[in-house]
Image (spheres, helix red, strand yellow):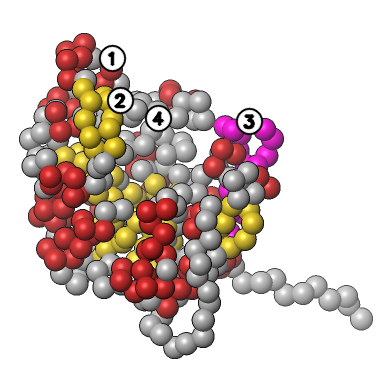
Amino acid sequence: MRETGLQTVPGSGRRVPRRHPVVIGHRGAAAHRLEHTRAGYELAADLGADRIEPDVVVSRDGALVVRHEVELSLSTDVADHPEFTDRRRTQEVAGAWCTGWFVQDFTLAELRTLRAVERWPHLRPGNTLHTGELMTLGEVVELARARGVGVQVELKDPTWSASIGLPLAELVAAELGAAPDVVLQSFDAAGVRELRDRLGAAAGLVQLIGDEAAFDGMVTPAGLREISTYADGIGPSKHRILLRDGAGTLVGVSDLVAQAHRAGLTVAPFTVRAENAFLPVHLRRGTDPAGLGDAGTEARLLLALGVDGLITDNPEIAVRERAALAAPALAPVRPRP
């Protein structure tokens, strides 16, 4: 992981007021149930998530469908449907070539015949025991409102989607508007800017920031100030805050949270996951990548650094650590005279 190059500097710039950090159930409660399924979203609410986080793509007939990416074979059983064999093809998606079955080649009715599958069966074998139908964005929002939680929607490659005649940002803006219980986010800066233009200042918008080199400019002071002109917050990879070396050893923390707050931006990093495969070396327990490590310590460190939220596959861990940090300190025990 690269250093951000940020330095803490004195000043009286615009600051984000401290809030109760929100827990955002990543694709539902993906550590326990299949991502983007009704059972996963309901479980996230049951485990205490304040928001649930669906990813949204567009079907051939313009339906807003909840999937992590436009290629379907990793997260559905599309390969087991002989009626769709001839739809497997190769295409460019946002600058990268990919082979498989693509959501824009299917109508919503056809997508309803597919079932969700676990994308990481080697890490989450328990999830292979579950199944679920594909959902629309409207159905997820309806579920969330019925359960009294918010929604944080990720738009997948909206600029690329518009280039193939499926205007994702326009469709999402038209369906959801600037609802107070909805936050919209994307890695695509042009897409986030389009949402601001369409929805105005009332919309809650987040610029997602990966840990790839292409995003390095966004985490400089100038980059953060630029983001603040069109978004309300950032969703950086946790590796932008908790710095690791190539061996997975935690080597320090950056001042990204403080700098983002100075630019008037909230910070909700992704993704806290409990399996060893996703944790720094010192928080792993045993050698099995699928074994459960100490994700609580990682969540606690991020919360202690002042983040405004956590995106997590394990909402129960973030909820527990948030409560522990908020609890009043115990009075010291003094010996009786």
Q: Secondary structure at mark 4?
A: loop
Q: Which mark is residue 284?
A: none
Looking at the rendered structure, the kind of residue marked 2 is: Ser
In this picture, is 173 found above or below 35? below
Residue at numbered disc 3: 288
In the picture of the structure, the residue carrying the numbered disc 1 is 80
Measure how far apart labels 2 and 3 are at the Cα level.
Answer: 26 Å
Horizontal relation, residue 205 to residue 2: left or right: left
Mark sitting earlier along the chain (1/3)? 1
Residue pictured at 15% horizontal, 69% vertical: 200
Q: Secondary structure at mark 1?
A: helix
Q: In the image, what residue type sits under mark 4?
A: Arg
Identified by mark 1, the residue type is Asp
Q: CA distance from mark 1 to mark 4?
A: 15 Å
> On the picture, is 337 further left or further right than 275?
right
Q: Which residue is mark 4?
A: 119
N-terminal of the pair, mark 2 or mark 1, is 2
Q: Earlier in the sequence, mark 2 or mark 4?
A: 2
Q: Residue at x 54, y 65 (%)?
A: 254
- Which quadrant of the view contains residue 279? top right
**Residue pushed farthest right?**
337
Q: Is residue 292 magenta?
A: yes
Tag 4 or tag 1, which sits nearer the N-term? Answer: 1
Q: CA distance from mark 1 to mark 3?
A: 30 Å
Identity of the residue drawn at 62% across and 72% down: 328
> Are the two marked residues, 1 and 4, in contact with CB atoms closer than 8 angstroms?
no
Name the front one of labels 2 and 1: 2
| Residue drawn at 53 percent across, 77 percent down | 8
